[in-house]
Image (spheres, rainbow, N blue to C red):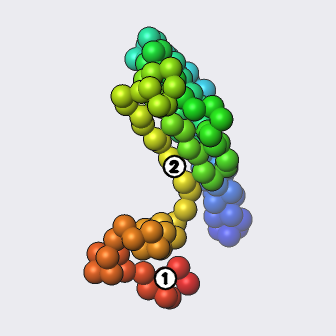
Amino acid sequence: MKKKLWCVLCIMICMMMIAACGQKKNPEKKKSEKAEQEETEFKDRESLKLSLFTVYYPKAWNYDKENMKKDEEYSYVRFFDGDTVDESENVIYIEATKEDSYKYRKSLRENGHCNNRKCRIYSNAGK
């Protein structure tokens, strides 16, 4: 009899825990608040959405549509403040990649951007 009572009690506690954990918070509300904040904060700017980031830039600036890349793991765009890149005083490059730190460090070493003391890569890393 005690075993049955304990079993029923455990089942009831489990059912209450499942019911309590099943309640969802409203994620759409958070997204809408964030979007609304971005709209008010950057309302006088243009926006460009790439796969890895969104850029809000002044309306007087342009970007290079021909050389822009928006892959799943790589995004690149170049902004300039004149009519063409050659006529511009300011040119801004924005680039983002999805990769692990070891791959990033390896690319830095291959391009000569860090010396051996500051940028060590171990052969057994990531295994």
- For the point 37% across and 67% down, the residue is 113
Quick check: can you spot residue 109? yes
* Residue 89 left/right relative to 71: left
Q: Closer to the camera, 4 or 65?
A: 65
Q: Quadrant of residue 9?
A: bottom right
Establish if 19 lies above or below 48: below
Q: Closer to the camera, 53 or 40?
A: 53
Q: Residues within 10 Å of mark 2 (few under 14, many from 20)?
A: some
Which residue is tagged 1? 125
- For the point 47% across and 15% down, the residue is 59
Q: Looking at this rendering, what residue extends furthest in the bottom direction?
A: 124
In the rendered structure, which disc, 2 or 1, sits on the residue that comes first in sequence?
Answer: 2
Amino acid marked by disc 2 = Ala
Which residue is tagged 2? 96
Q: Residues within 10 Å of mark 1 (few under 14, many from 20)?
A: few
Amino acid marked by disc 1 = Ala
Q: Are marks 2 and 1 in contact (CB under 8 Å)?
A: no
- For the point 63% across and 53% down, the residue is 73
